[in-house]
Amino acid sequence: MQFNVSGHLEYTVRFPSTLILNIHAQKNSGQLILQENFVVQPPLARVEEFQLTDGCSRFVRLETGNAAQFTIDYTATVDCSHEIVPANTIDQTPVGEMDRSAIPYLFPSRYCQSDRLSRLAWDLFGGIPHPYDKVLAIVDWIHDNVEYVIGSTDSETSAYDTVTQRTGVCRDFAHLGIALCRALNIPARYFSGYAYQLDPPDFHACFECFVGGKWFLFDATGLAPLNGLVRIGTGRDAADSAVASTFGRVQCTLMTVDCQLAPNQQFEPLGRTQLSRNGLSLGSGRVQNSN
Amino acid sequence: MQFNVSGHLEYTVRFPSTLILNIHAQKNSGQLILQENFVVQPPLARVEEFQLTDGCSRFVRLETGNAAQFTIDYTATVDCSHEIVPANTIDQTPVGEMDRSAIPYLFPSRYCQSDRLSRLAWDLFGGIPHPYDKVLAIVDWIHDNVEYVIGSTDSETSAYDTVTQRTGVCRDFAHLGIALCRALNIPARYFSGYAYQLDPPDFHACFECFVGGKWFLFDATGLAPLNGLVRIGTGRDAADSAVASTFGRVQCTLMTVDCQLAPNQQFEPLGRTQLSRNGLSLGSGRVQNSN
Amino acid sequence: MQFNVSGHLEYTVRFPSTLILNIHAQKNSGQLILQENFVVQPPLARVEEFQLTDGCSRFVRLETGNAAQFTIDYTATVDCSHEIVPANTIDQTPVGEMDRSAIPYLFPSRYCQSDRLSRLAWDLFGGIPHPYDKVLAIVDWIHDNVEYVIGSTDSETSAYDTVTQRTGVCRDFAHLGIALCRALNIPARYFSGYAYQLDPPDFHACFECFVGGKWFLFDATGLAPLNGLVRIGTGRDAADSAVASTFGRVQCTLMTVDCQLAPNQQFEPLGRTQLSRNGLSLGSGRVQNSN
Amino acid sequence: MQFNVSGHLEYTVRFPSTLILNIHAQKNSGQLILQENFVVQPPLARVEEFQLTDGCSRFVRLETGNAAQFTIDYTATVDCSHEIVPANTIDQTPVGEMDRSAIPYLFPSRYCQSDRLSRLAWDLFGGIPHPYDKVLAIVDWIHDNVEYVIGSTDSETSAYDTVTQRTGVCRDFAHLGIALCRALNIPARYFSGYAYQLDPPDFHACFECFVGGKWFLFDATGLAPLNGLVRIGTGRDAADSAVASTFGRVQCTLMTVDCQLAPNQQFEPLGRTQLSRNGLSLGSGRVQNSN
C-alpha cells in the first residue's frame, strides 16, 4: 500500500540551538521509500541526517545558527508492506528463545515503568495462555478503561500515572500498553508514524510487541487503521522517538501533518474483528540487509 | 593495569526460569581479557553468551530447565587501559557536533528522569562554562548532599527521588549523576563493574559522561578509585545493566564478588585532586574494531 | 462487648526527644473505659495526656529528658457498643445535606490522594446507586485485588501506589479504601485500634465511611472481625493517627499488643455475609456529650 | 488596617451539584468584619454558611438544584490587626511545650509531604539555631530557587514536585514552605486570603508557622505585602482551603477578585528587611472567645 505523507513545521529561534527531528519515514524491510523530499527554509548552518545502530529511525540534526526562524517541509511516497499473519499461527516465544535484538525492549524505560506494574499486569492478564492473546486483552482493557482526552496529560505523564488516572492521548495509550506487555515478559516498543484516516491529522503513536519472532502492531486508541500506518520512529518510549528534541531555545509555532493514499491505491481498513484473528506486522524496523 | 576479578552466585529455582546475567568483563578498546572462565554447575539446559548491537556488554542467557539450584562462577584476568587526559585539553562538544552514538544517552530513562530535573540542574550548574567542569561540580554536589546509606533505597528508587530524599547506594548516586548531566545536554550513561579496593567487595556502579569526544568516568560515591574499575555493563541506567534480570522464579541466595590486582602490578589510586585536573577514560565501551 | 487491651512499648533514647503516642482507647459514645492504667518506667520529665478538638483521639506527649531508655505500659478494659444497622435502612447522604463534621473527610490527604483516583473510582464503582453498596464493593475489590504481604510497603507508600502495586499491609488497605470512597464523595477516615482475634496480635488499621448520618466500619483485609475492634485513633490517614510520632532520636525496640475478651463475655464474630446486609458502627468518634 | 474586599464568581451548572465555597473573610481575634454582603443570583435551593470546629474558616455550602447558572458576589470591609513582633523576642517552642492546637500542623498532608523532604530540610536549614530564623531562611531559599511561572503547575502538583521542578504559583510556594517547616518540626499551615497590591488581583496563598506561641505569616512569592493580607482560609494545605470544592458538575466561567484600602487608611508596605527583624502575625485563626 502506497501513501503520500507530509509534515510541515515552523520554528522560531530565540538562541542558537540544535534540533533533532524524527519525521522521516523509515527505510526497511517493511517500507520502501518511492520518493521523498526534505527542505529547510532558509538553509541552516548545518543539516545532517543520521541513523542509530539499534534501529533505523532516521534522525535529522539541525544547527539553527543565527537564523531567527525556519520551516521544515518533508514529503514522501512510501510503499508499506503490511503483513497479515493468522493469529493461530503465531508461536509463543519464551524469553529464553527470544531473538536477542528484542531483549532491550523487555526492560522498563522512562515512561513505561513495567517493574511497578508487574503485579497488576499478572493479575489482569497472567491467566491468558498465549502472549498474542495477552496483548489483545491489554489493548481491549486500555481501550475500555482509559478515555482519550486531548490536553489531559503532559510530557511528564507516564504509564504509572495513566493506569490510575485513566485519561490520555495516543502517546499515553502506547506507554501503558508497552508497560503492561513488558511486565508480562513480552518485548514491546514505541511506534511513531503517519496515520491514514487519523482525524484530526497529526503524528500518531502506538506500539509493537514481539511475539513468535515478529513485531506486531497494536493501537489501543483505535483512532486509525493499523494498515494505514507509516513508520517513522522505533524506540523504547517517547523519550527515544520524539518528533523533535530541542537543545537550546526554539519554539514550534506551527505543525501540520498529512497522510493520503497514493493515486490508484485501494484501501480497506483492517477492523477490530479481523485483528483479533490476525496479527499485523510492518517489518522489523531494522535495515533491510540486516533483517 | 591488570586485575583478577571473580563473581560467585548461587541460585535457587522455584519454577523453570530464564536469567540474563551481565557479569562478564567487556572486551573493547579499553579492556583486554587475558583469560577468563565461566562455569555453571550443574550444567543447565541452555547457556548462551550474546551481545547487543549498541555496546559490548556481554550477557549470558540461562535456561534453568528443571534444575532446583545452580551456581555461577566467573573469573577473569583483565588488562584495563585507563587513559588519563589533562582536563584543560578536553574540548566542549555541543549537541550539534556530538558523535551520533552518544545521542541516545541524552534522553531520559527509567531511573534518570532528566526532563524533570532540568531546571534544578541549570540553576545549580548552568553557569559553569565547560561541560567537564559541570560534571565535576555535579559529582561534588552529590557527594556533599547525598548520604551513602545501605538499605535506604530499593529497586524502584530513581533520580527524582534521590535528589530530594538524599540517601542511597552506588546505583542511586550514579542515576542522579546521569540525570543531572543529561538535563544539561551532556550525554551520560550507567557503568557497572568490578572495583578494586571497594570495601566491602561487591559489584559497583558509577557513570560516564561524553565530553570532547570521549567517555569519562565519574563516581560520586568516592568509594573506589576510578583507575581500579573493570567494566562490565554499559547502559542508560540500571534497567539496562542489571547484574541479573530474571524471568520466572529464581532467587539469588549468595553473591560474592572479588577484584584483586594481578601479580606484579603496581597500583596508585587516582585521588580527587588529580581528577579535578585530569579526566579518566576506559575506552568507548564499544567493540575494538568499530571504535 | 468488653475487651481487655494492652500495649507494651520499649524505647531507647539517643538524644532528648519528644514522643506523641496514640495508644489509649477512646472515650466516646461508642466506648466506655471501665478501667485503665498507663505507666511510664522510669518516670519521664514530662508526660501529658491531651485531645485535639476535632475528635477524641487521646494523645500522650512525653519528654524523654535525659532518660536512656524507657518502657510504656497501657492496659484497659473497654466496653464497646458496636451498633448493627440493617443495610436497607441506611439512607443516602448527598454532600449538600451531610453533617458538617464529616466534610473534612471528603478531601485528599497525604496517603489518600482521592483527587488522583477519581476517574478510576467512578469507572469501577460509580454505577452502584447506594453509597453503602459502593463502599461494600470497594472493600471487595481491594480484598480481591491487593495481596496482604508483610514488608511489601513502607511509611511512604500511599493509595496512589497501592492501587497499582497491589500489595500492602492493613494501613495500605485502609488508605486505598479511604481514597476510593472520598473520590466518590463519601467521607472516609482512618481507624486505628486494638483488634480481637488478629493474628499475630498487633495494632490494626481499617477505615470508616460516613453514610446516612453514621460512621460505619470497614476492613478490606478481613483479618479481624469488625465487632472485635476497640477504637484508638481517628484521623484523615496514618499521618494523623500514628501509634507514635517521634521528634528527636528515639527508637522503638519492642512492641507487644494484646486484645482479649473480658471474663464472662460471649463473642460471635460478624462474618462477611452479615456485613453485606448490616452496617457496623462504633460511635461517632466524638466525645459523648457533643455527639 | 481596613480593607474593602470583594469576590465575584460565575458558574455554569451541567447537573444538580453541591459547592463548598471558602471566600468569606474570617472573624477572629485578628480580624473584625465591619460590614459584609453575600449574594447568590438567582437564589439557589439551599445556601448555608458554616464553620468547622478546628478553625474559623467560613464555608458556604450551596445546592444548585436545577439552576443553569448563577453568580456569587461577596463584599466586605475588614479591619485586620496585623501584629508586629520583634524577631528577637520570639521564643523557641520545642514540640514538647507546643500548644496542642498546633500539633496537627506538624504532620504531612496531601500537598506537603514533609516526611519525604526531611533530610533535605535538615541538610539545608538544620544548622540554623532559632526556628524563626529557620523559616526566614526557607522563605529566602524558595524565593531564590523557585520561579513564579503561571500555568507551570496543576492541581496535582505537590511540594515533592516543586522542590525539584522549581516552578510554580503562590499555592506551590506555600506548599513547599509548609513541607520544609514541618520537616523541621515547626508547625506550618496554609493561608488563603485577599491580598492588597497583588498584581494581577486574585485570591492569594501563603503560609503561617507557629513559633514562640504565635502563628507568623510568611510569603515566599514576595508578591504582596504581608500586612496587606486578609485571611479567608486556614488549613493543612490547599486540599483544606480551596476557594471552591465542587461535587457534581459545575464550571467556574469567571472569577474577579479585588482588595482595596478602605477610605482614610494609610498603608505602608512591610518590606523584606523589616520582616527579617520582625514577625508579622494576623491572629490565631481561631474564634475570638476561644483564643
Image: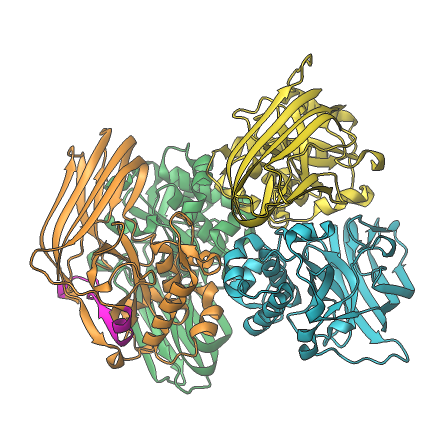
Chain colours: A orange, B green, C cyan, D yellow
- Residue at point 83%, 64% (across, down): C30
Count of residue discs? 0
Q: Quadrant of residue D81?
A: top right
User: Does residue C192 appear to the left or right of A274 in the view shown?
Assistant: right
Residue D33, given in percent of the width and then of the height, sits at 74, 27
Quadrant holding the N terminus of chain A: bottom left
| Residue placed most toward the observer, C98 or B57 | C98
| Residue placed most toward the observer, D243 or B91 | D243
Residue B229, given in percent of the width and then of the height, sits at 40, 57
Is residue A213 shown to the viewer in this render?
no
Is residue D99 shown to the viewer in this render?
yes
Image: D85 above or below A222:
above
User: Does residue A172 appear to the left or right of C148 in the view shown?
Assistant: left
> Magenta segment range?
A272-289
Q: Quadrant of residue B42?
A: bottom left
Residue A274 located within the stretch drawn in magenta? yes
Quadrant holding the C terminus of chain A: bottom left
Residue B56, given in percent of the width and then of the height, sits at 29, 62
Residue D256 located within the stretch drawn in magenta? no
Q: Quadrant of residue B191?
A: bottom left
